[in-house]
Amino acid sequence: MKRIGLIVLLCAVVMLGWSQPKYVFYFIGDGMGPNNVMAAQMYLSELQGKIGVERLTMTTLPFTGQLSTFSTSNGITDSSAAGTCLATGTKTNNGTLGLDEEGNPVTTIAEKLHKAGWAVGLTTSVSIDHATPAAFYAHVAKRNMYYQIGTQLPESGFEFFGGASFYEPTDKNDPDAPNVYNLCRDNGYEFAHGYKDAQNKLDSKRLILIQEGEGEDITEAGWAQIPYAINRKPNDLTLAQITETAIKFLEQKSDRFFLMVEGGAIDWANHSQDGATSIREVIDFDESIQIAYAFYKEHPDETLIVITADHETGGMALGNSNYTLNLQLLQNQKCSSNMLSDMLHEKMSGEKKASWEEVKELLREQLSLYEKVEVTKEEDQKLQATYKKMLKGKAGDIKTLYKSINKLSGKAVALLNQKSKLGWTSYSHTAAPVPIYAIGVGAENFTGWKDNSEIAPLIEKIALP
Ligand SMILES: [Zn+2]
């Protein structure tokens, strides 16, 4: 009898051992609401000439649910309170990073797993001192304390970071304070500039992968991000490349790893109400998910993939009038509204300012307005009126959280969105629920209606029982 008991116990231990993942992927689409996912799927379907849904990898995963995202200070969260909650399970006030409501540091899931011997990687398509990645390694009172956040990165000792460089690598208030790049080097980190460079540095102890050309030369404040998918040039770093490199790197460092991947620029595109850019970012985010999914297929009994978002941004609606949707029109947009804004700015700021015909040519080139996308006389007059104001320097900018877009760029892109039948309600975040998708060991826990405070504790329970 005793022997049978022992066998049962052994079997239970072995089975329990099997039910623990060795590899955990945590994907966070910043600002990615349910309609962002749906827009991308319906857009892809329309491109094939079909009404319906062309599934992204994330929506093919077997377990799905929804999350509420409110913070302790408001029904609408910001990215730092949401990131803190997704990283720790503790809700906090908007603007706070890695601390609870009372200001006490809260241990993150990445820190807990690292302490237990897991290799840890934190990656993003924006700067690595930005709210979401920072929520996994930094603890500061305000999310805009970028320098302080940066100094905490090397203290984490996490094996891998990837994304755009640092937003504020130097201390604005103290010119003698050490530069974040040097602090990282002092703590055993090596920098890789671009994908190719990273492949030669996979043997280093700790690695920070950033976009080629970025690094110490960037001292001026500018919102760092790897280029939007819609603006991408052949050698630009992509989120999928970062994910692939992170896996290769982390696999060498320990027999278990935790990798967080943030699609950070979905939020930025939504803040600008730029539908085409947002959709391409969601598709791009899904491409990085495909890398993890391929890894899962090789290690199905040892991998957990959880995909969610920190909040919704922009209040995107699929439909703005009558029963029509024409998302395929968005394929005519060749660059983000931010880039178009820069192009217009350049044309309009020199000695010789561009004529309306020249500006129209740019809109034709970049948005296919007046060409594949019809512009009515009334719409043309409105755009021209904005151009005239711009000539006098009186058009002003549309201020979004991260970057201002000049009104003409904003209005031209808004016109394309309106014709695609996309609606927007806000230049900021909303309280809309966000989706959650999961596959792998313990994935069945991530279903139904949940709050964002439940996710990190669930991952912990599954990975560190
Ligand atoms: Zn945001």
Image (tube, grey):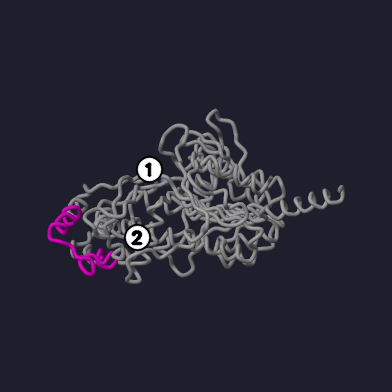
Q: Residue at x 52, y 61 (%)?
A: 288
| Disc 1, SS | strand
Residue with the most extreme top position: 102
Q: In front: 435, or 136?
A: 435
Q: Amino acid at mark 1?
A: Thr
> Tag 2 or tag 1, which sits nearer the N-term?
2
| Location of the C terminus (image quadrant) | top right
Q: Residue at x 33, y 46 (%)?
A: 427
Residue 256, horizontal then vertical, whole percent: 69, 55
Residue with the most extreme bottom position: 48
Asked if the stretch drawn in magenta spans residue 317, the answer is no
Instruction: Characterize the local packing of mark 1: few (<14), some (14-19) or many (20 or more) Cα atoms within 10 angstroms.
Output: many
Task: Identify the magenta region.
Answer: 362-387
Residue 53 visible to an observer of this rendering = yes
* Horizontal relation, residue 276 to residue 95: left or right: left
Q: In front: 142, or 72?
A: 72
Instruction: Characterize the local packing of mark 2: few (<14), some (14-19) or many (20 or more) Cα atoms within 10 angstroms.
Output: many
Residue 360, horizontal then vertical, whole percent: 21, 64
* Horizontal relation, residue 236 to residue 395: left or right: right
Ligand 1 within 8 Å of disc 2? The answer is no
Q: Which residue is the site of mark 1?
A: 430
Q: Is residue 283 above or below residue 389?
A: below
Residue with the most extreme right position: 2
Residue 88, horizontal then vertical, whole percent: 58, 40
Q: Amino acid at mark 2?
A: Ala
Q: Which residue is the site of mark 2?
A: 276
Q: Residue at x 49, y 39 (%)?
A: 81
Q: Nearer the viewer, mark 1 or mark 2?
A: 1
Residue 178 visible to an observer of this rendering = no
| Magenta span main SS | helix
